Image: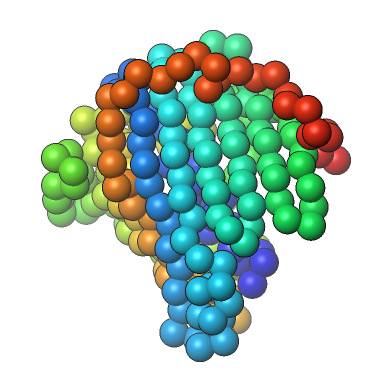
Amino acid sequence: MKKLLQIAFTFAVTLSIAQGKLTEGVITSKMTMSSANEQLNAQLQMVGDTQILTYIKGAKMRSETSNPMTGETISITDRDENKVLTLQNIPMYGKTYSISEFVKDDIDTEGIDIKKTENAKEILGYTCDEYDIIMTQDGVDMTVKVFATTQIEAVSKQTATFGGKFEGFPMHMVFDVKQQGMDMVMTYEVTDVSKDTVPDDKFDMTVPEGYIEKQ
C-alpha cells in the first residue's frame, strides 16, 4: 500500500504545482481516496482528505500539502534561481528539508502513455480538455483521467517530461490505481482559483529552525 500511495500522490502533487498565465494568486485544491476493498478503504478513510494550497507569483511558487495522518509538506520553487526547497513535517519522522534543482526529473516517466480526447467541460469558469493517461511503474498499474485548461498555461517538471503531449493546468484528475488486488481511486480537484496578492515572504527559501537535512 505504501508504494501505491507514494506513486499516485507524487504524480498528483507534481501536476498540481504548475505555473501558468495566472501570474499571482492562490489555487486551492483537495485530494480524496477510496477503495472497493473494505479493509483498504477503512485505512484510506483514516488517512482522510489531503488539502493543497498553491501560491503563485511570477517565477516563484509555493505548494502547501497537509493531511492529519501523513503530516505537512511545503515545496517552494524559484524558477529564476532554478531551486526547489522542500520542507516535510511527518509524524514519527520529524522535520526534514531538501534543496534540489527545479529542472531535475524526480519521476521515472517510462511506461506513461498520454492521449488527448475530444471531450471538454467547464470547471470554475475555465474550459478544460480531457486527457487519458496510462501508467505502469514499479508493479503498479494506474489510469488517470485529467481535465486541464490552457487558460492557465501550465509549465511544470511533469508536463515538460511529457514532450508536449500534455498541455494546460490540471483542474480535475481521477486516478484508478491497481496493485495486487489493492485497488484504489484517488480524486484531485481544484476548488478555487483566486487572484489574491501573495506576500514575498511566502517564497523565502531560508530553512526554518528545527529542520534537519533529509538523508
Query: Is residue 78 at all visible to an observer of this figure?
Result: no
In the picture shown, does residue 167 fall above or below 35? above
Location of the C terminus (image quadrant): top right
Q: Decide which of 174, 50 is in the foreground and name it.
A: 50
Location of the N terminus (image quadrant): bottom right
In x, y percent, where is residue 79?
A: 53, 17
In the picture shown, does residue 197 fall above or below 52? above
Q: Is residue 196 left or right of residue 31?
A: left
State the residue at coordinates (45%, 17%): 199
State the residue at coordinates (14%, 47%): 122
Q: Decide which of 171, 42 is in the foreground and name it.
A: 42
Residue at the bottom extreme of this rendering: 38
In x, y percent, where is residue 187?
A: 38, 61
Query: Is residue 107 at all visible to an observer of this figure?
Result: yes
Q: Is residue 123 left or right of residue 44?
A: left
Number of numbered tags placed on the structure image: 0
In x, y percent, where is residue 13?
A: 50, 46
In x, y percent, where is residue 28?
A: 36, 41
In the picture shown, does residue 163 fall above or below 82? below
State the residue at coordinates (73%, 26%): 208
State the residue at coordinates (43%, 57%): 31
Q: Decide which of 129, 215 is in the foreground and name it.
A: 215
Q: Is residue 179 left or right of residue 132?
A: right
Query: Which quadrant of the structure image shows residue 153?
Result: top left
